[in-house]
Image: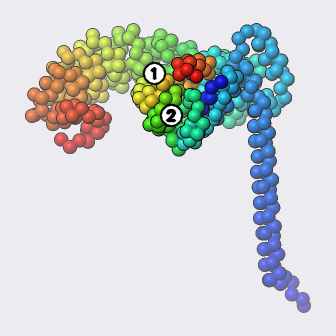
Amino acid sequence: MSNAWPDPLLLMAAVTAAVVLMMLVAVSVGAVLRARRHRAAARRERLATTIRPLISDAMDIADGAGSVAMDHALRALSRSAGETLDDLVVALVPKLRGTERKLLVELLRRRGTIERVARDLTSRSPRRRLSAVEFLGAVDDGSHAAALVRLLDDRDEAVRLAAIRALGRIGLPEAVPALLGRLDRPEPRRELPRHAVTMAVLRCGSGSADHVLQSLRHGGAASRLAAAQVLGWLGELGAAPELRDALAHDTSPDVRAAAAEALGRLGVPETAADLVVCLDEPHPALVRVAAATALGLIGDTASATGLAMTLCTDADLRVRLAAAQAMARLGGPGLSALRVLSPVSPHAREVLRVTLAGTPEPPFGALLRTPL
Amino acid sequence: MSTIALVDDDRDICLLLELKLRAAGHEVLVEHDGEAGLAMMRDRRPDLVILDWMMPRLSGLEVCLAVRDDAELRELPIILLTAKAQEADVERGLSAGADDYVVKPFSPRELLSRVEARLRRSGT
């Protein structure tokens, strides 16, 4: 009977040959793909070299005749040249400002690029929706703001975040109620990061102050908190009465603390008395810390007494430290009080030492860790 | 015709500004990192430099300081073109020896006006 199994040596040789052949094929395919990529990149760069002067000319258009000539030039572009132009313009727009930026965005609009990309806002692919959102944010196109607002509820987290950022970049005050209101409607598995929303509202600028005030007055706790923060950062002096009201009456300690911080940023001396009231212990520690810090920023020396009492008597270490730091910021009267209290208060001693040494004030957390 | 050095690692901006500056009649020299930019300035002695801050190998600030330390380059007008927009950054840039400070995003038109103004003042 003949042996049915092949010779082992032959088998090994065949396997080795197959492996070597596969490796050769893989290396060849890799080399071909790399060469193709290089050729495509070189083609794109050649195209880009011919397109860039067109983009430069587009930024210099001063009149209707120039626009007509530009339209002719755009219509003459091949499809690949048009795509290259779009890519180059989209890369440039975020780096420019002023008339040239507006002209480039107008260029994209005339090419129909913005409308074409905007169709992807309702694509089934999250990658395409994300790409469209980022594009519209980069070109500051506000004409699709409503669609961007809808994407605050997108099932994809990256799309939601991109929509928040795009609305902030575009900076439409009209989008602010939707942004802040969404904080009050937490959707399971479709959360919006509060900080990202707050920054986007902040980017909408002073023009959004009325909308932000509305949220402070009538919104839920989350939007009231964001609203208080934004008003402080925007420096909206006109919001001081509403912030004082929130400091005194809001049901949320977080909102009250944010209102105190905002009043500190606004630096209105007339609000110091309201903040001193908040140094007392029935108020939550969070609010007492914020009130003390705000008093330091406002710099009203009349609050030195209230801060000194807090430094000596408050049960919470963080509050005592905040009071000491605020007293240092008051200058003369505050420093004098710290000197008087130094023998009995290690926080007064430490803050005084740092202040007199002229070293940068250590962050609050570092002071908490300083051996006393 | 003046020679303008452009030192920025952002190639899109370099290509755009190169077009604009050439269209305005200037010769343009481009480098994409601080070290190469400094070497180019020492070798080619441009009439003005537009300098980015955040760059590989040598930052724009370091280039500024090196230029002001160099007896042959000391008077070279420098315009810093950077995304660093805080007041403290502007102070640092001007203290390091820059003559002007333009924040990104920027207007090419405005930048060119500043270039022309600097060149006029330096008699080029």
Q: Which chain carries label 1?
A: A
Which residue is identified by label 2? B73
Give the residue type at disc 1.
Ser
Query: Which residue is at the front of the view, A213 or A106?
Result: A106
Residue at 39% over, 9% down? A238
Residue at 80% over, 59% down? A28
Outermost residue to the right:
A1
Q: x%, y% of residue A79?
A: 83, 30
Q: x%, y% of residue A37?
A: 77, 46
Around disc 1, counting alpha carbons within 10 Å, would you say few (fewer than 14), some (14 to 19), or many (20 or more)? many
Q: Is residue A148 above or below residue A206?
A: below
Residue at 29% over, 33% down? A360
Q: What element carries label 1?
A: helix
Left/right of residue A178 with respect to residue A76 in the rendered view: left
Q: Is residue A221 above or below residue B53?
A: above
Q: In this view, does A27 lie above or below A45?
A: below
The disc at residue A223 is 1
Q: Is mark 2 on a helix, strand or loop?
A: loop
Give the residue type at disc 2.
Leu
Of the two numbered discs 1 and 2 in the rendering, the one whose residue sits closer to the viewer: 2
The quadrant the N terminus of chain A occupies is bottom right
